[in-house]
Each structure stands twice: as C-alpha cells, then as structure tokens.
C-alpha cells in the first residue's frame, strides 16, 4: 500500500478533508501515514487527534538547505511514496521535487492560471479575485514542479462568487465547495495511477 505524507502550515482544514475521506473509504490506494509541519500550527493537533504520526520540521530552526536535508531524511525513513501539500506555505526546493517527481500534489485556492504563482496564497488569492471582479473562482489541484503553481493541472472545481462575498466568506466557500472535495479525489486518482504503473 502506498504511503502518503501530508505537509501542513496552518488550520489543517484540507488535512481534515483528507482524513475524513480516508475514514469514509474514499481513498483506497494509499494510506496517510505521516503529517509534517514546518511550524507549530492547529493542523498538528488535528493530525494527532486522528491518530496520525506528526513531525515538526520547524523552519526557524532548520534554515534553507538544512530544511531540505531534514525533510528528505524524514520522507525516506518513513518510506513515503506520495506528498500532499495541504495549506503548506514553504516553497519546496528542487532536490525534493526531483526525488518525488510527479508524486507531489498541491491545492491552490483559485482556478489556475488565474490568481496563482509567486505571492498568491491564502486569503490574498481571494482578495485579488474580488478586486478583479471575476464572477467565478474555485480551486485547483496540480502536480508540483519548480514553478510555483506551475505543474500539470489534475483537477479543478468552480465556485460562483456572490454579490456580498468578501475575502473571508469567499475563502470559506472555496474551501467547502471546492478544495475539500477535489484534494481527496486527486490523491486517490494519483495513488491509483501509481499503483497501476507499479503493477505493470
Ligand atoms: C487555504 O486557503 C488553502 O486554499 C491553502 O492554504 C489555506 C489553508 O489551508 N492551500 P488549511 O486550512 O491549512 O488546509
């Protein structure tokens, strides 16, 4: 069974969605065996509450190369096959992306290529969408490569922007109606694909 590590930096709502999907049997081709945080955050508590092993690689203690080295060591020791970035704010360095080519997915809170790339993360994405006046936004799951939000798009789900939406209400809507639905789906599809490739 493939092993998945979920990388987190924040609230852990996307992690929750993954764990819920796993509990409901919707993720059949991989097991979430590890949660890695780059800073103390509520997502760690959510992982522990669900019996998942957690490892904190504090980005203030492990700077630059040290972070990469520590992360690669942990991923290897835990025999991780797939990495999910779920609200993870650090940009992964090339050695990690190379070591896990086409096996790292990220959830981005817009319909890439809109409102994506360097500097577009979290609430800022929704502020920009509202400022531009788009009527539809959504979320994207994509493979992670060296270009921020530039990897192959795997899944997208759209969300209508309401007259009275503000960045906070829009963020919540995009999470509930898009992120939390497509991230577990994308993980299962990727794990199923890799499993088939291994069996061939
Ligand atoms: C959310 O805006 C999500 O779109 C982005 O990170 C933020 C926090 O996610 N990827 P979470 O609650 O920590 O999963």
Image: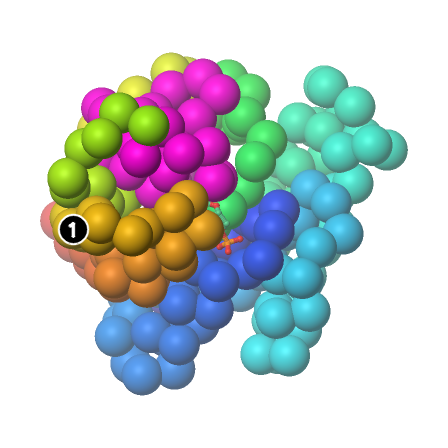
Q: Where does the image place residue 20, in percent across and percent down from the top left?
A: 39, 76
The image quarter containing residue 24 is bottom left
Residue positioned most to the bottom: 24
Taking the image as shown, residue 64 lies to the left or right of residue 192, namely: right
Q: In which quadrant of the rendered view does residue 62 lie? A: top right
Say which quarter of the image contains residue 132: top left
Could you tell me which quadrant the N terminus lies in? Answer: bottom left
- Asked if disc 1 is less than 8 Å from ligand 1, the answer is no
Q: Is residue 34 above or below residue 16?
A: above
Residue for point 76% across, 34% down: 59
73 versus 172 height, above or below: above
Residue drawn at 31 percent across, 35 percent down: 130
Q: Which residue is mark 1?
A: 160
Chosen colour scheme = rainbow
What is the total number of numbered labels drawn onto the structure image?
1
Residue farthest along the front direction in this orientation: 164
The furthest residue to the right: 61
125 falls in the magenta region: yes
Q: Residue 123, relative to residue 177: is it above or below? A: above
Which residue appears at 26% of the width and 45% of the height? Answer: 139
Front one among 169 and 79: 169
Q: Horizontally, is 156 left or right of 139 in the view? A: left
Q: Position of residue 151 (x, y in %)?
A: 28, 25
Residue range (magenta): 101-130
């Amino acid at each position: 069974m493939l092993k998945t590590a979920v990388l987190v930096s924040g609230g852990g709502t996307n992690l929750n969605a993954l764990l819920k999907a796993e509990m409901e049997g919707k993720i059949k081709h991989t097991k979430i065996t590890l949660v890695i945080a780059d800073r103390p955050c509520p997502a760690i508590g959510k992982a522990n509450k669900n019996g998942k092993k957690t490892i904190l690689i504090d980005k203030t203690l492990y700077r630059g190369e040290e972070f990469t080295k520590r992360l690669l060591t942990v991923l290897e020791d835990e025999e991780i096959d797939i990495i999910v970035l779920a609200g993870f704010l650090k940009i992964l360095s090339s050695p990690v992306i190379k070591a896990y080519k086409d096996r790292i997915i990220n959830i981005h809170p817009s319909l890439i290529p809109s409102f994506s790339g360097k500097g577009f993360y979290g609430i800022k994405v929704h502020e920009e969408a509202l400022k531009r006046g788009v009527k539809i936004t959504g979320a994207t799951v994509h493979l992670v490569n060296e270009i921020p939000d530039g990897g192959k798009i795997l899944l997208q789900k759209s969300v209508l922007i309401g007259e009275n939406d503000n960045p906070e209400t829009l963020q919540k809507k995009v999470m509930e109606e898009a992120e939390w639905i497509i991230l577990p789906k994308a993980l299962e599809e990727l794990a199923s694909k890799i499993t088939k490739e291994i069996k061939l």
